[in-house]
Each structure stands twice: as C-alpha cells, then as structure tokens.
Amino acid sequence: MLTFDDLREDNWNQYGNFVMRSETIYPESIRSPGEEFTCILKSEDSVAKVLLLDSEYIGNAVGFCMDEEDKGDFGLDKLPGNPKIIYLFNILIDPSHQGRGYGSMLMQEFIKSAKSKGYDYIVGHFRPNGSLHIIKKFGAVEGAVCKNWENIGEDYIFCILDLRSIPEALPGEHVQDSRACLPSLSIPPLKVSPAMGMPTYHQGHNFDMHHHAQTA
C-alpha cells in the first residue's frame, strides 16, 4: 500500500537516515548534507514529502520558498503579481522502485501540497531522465540548459510549472498541460551555474541546488 507522510524537523530522526542513504547514489560533489535538509524543514513554507510502500521509505520530495533575490537571479521577477515560488530542491525514488510510476505519484502529491500552501509556481533543475519527463507531463516548460552541472559532466534543465492552471486531479488522472497559460519568459541561460552563487534560502542559508532527481 502506498502512503505519503510529511517530512518535518520533528520526524527527521525517523526518515533522515533513509533520505541520506538515497544521496549516496549521486557523485559526492552534489550530495546534500543532512543540515541542508533540516534547515529547509524549519520553515513553515517548506514542502517535504516521503513516499512509503507498505510503511517502508521509497522516496522523497523537498522544496523551499524562493526569496526576492532568488527570483531576480532566475529572471522570475518578470512574472506578474509577485507570485509565491517554490524551488524543488530534491525529488527521488529509490532505484529499486523506479519504473513503476511512483515518481509521478510523488510529484503529484508535492504539487497538491504546494498548491495548498499558496504557491503559484514550482521551479527546479532536472536531469534529462525520468524526472524531466515527469515534471513536463504536468505541464512544465523548459528554460535554460545548465551545461556540466556542478562539473559532473551532465547537463541539467531548468523548468517552470504554473500551478495556477493545474486543476485538482485525482491520483493517476491526467493533468492538463499548463504551458499555454504561462507568460512569455526569457529565462537567461547559465543564470544558475557552478560559477555563480546558488539561490539563497529565505532564512539566509545558501543551498547547493543539486536537483538530481532519479524518478521514473
């Protein structure tokens, strides 16, 4: 049976070891330390979920609220109405459970929670694998290509998803493509590159935005 649980500062001891074990599948240079996760979880604006299969951890999705400086760095200050934007810091399904649609379920739960907290957009950097396919299935639009992300020899794709055009959908239900509802954005390439400072979390903590999703 599949269930979701909120990942919080007060239950990090329950799930933290699983989350950190997941990090070991990535090159060491882009692994996030536990302190980055727990700092995100301190904020009421964070959205963090774990996916459980028969009560056992199989994946997580974590995002934090972007501040005004972050929005400017990404060219998102051009969006009208000063929207609330969440950066999808991490999304991952354990490799032994990939290829079964769990990534889409986790993404949909993350979207549902983000909408309930008043977010207008989700943005993030995606590997050109299952994670990119999943976020685009929900209507995300590709922006800049970040070449040789963190010097690991892989390109990452910056994407933006307009949550305001996504209806409340049942699990497994096809979600309407929202790209026609987006304003015309020119997201500068390499705005977020290894040579530049990473986005600043709104409580002042600098995060290594590794968005190294392996969902499928």
Image: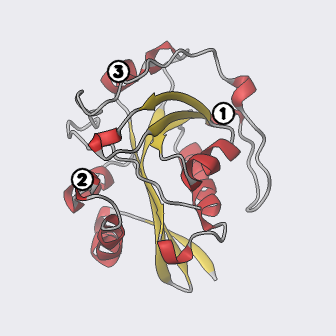
Q: Quadrant of residue 178?
A: top right
Q: How far across and how far down the image is residue 139, in percent?
A: 69, 38
Answer with mark 3 or mark 1, whichever residue precedes in sequence: 3
Q: In this rendering, does residue 48 appear at all?
A: no
Q: Quadrant of the N terminus?
A: bottom right
Q: Residues within 10 Å of mark 1 (few under 14, many from 20)?
A: some
Q: CA distance from mark 3 to mark 1?
A: 23 Å
Q: Are marks 3 and 1 in contact (CB under 8 Å)?
A: no
Q: Residue at x 24, y 38 (%)?
A: 203
Q: How far across and how far down the image is residue 134, in percent?
A: 63, 51
Vertical arrangement, residue 11 with respect to residue 155, above or below: below
Q: Residue at x 24, y 27 (%)?
A: 196
Q: How far across and how far down the image is residue 180, in percent?
A: 75, 25
The residue to which callout 1 is attached is 164
Q: Residues within 10 Å of mark 2 (few under 14, many from 20)?
A: few
Q: Secondary structure at mark 1?
A: helix
Q: In this rendering, does residue 210 appear at all?
A: yes
208 to the left or right of 84: left
The residue to which callout 3 is attached is 73
The residue to which callout 2 is attached is 36
Q: CA distance from mark 1 to mark 2?
A: 29 Å
Answer with mark 1 or mark 2, whichever residue precedes in sequence: 2
Amino acid type of the residue that numbered disc 1 sits on in the rendered structure:
Arg
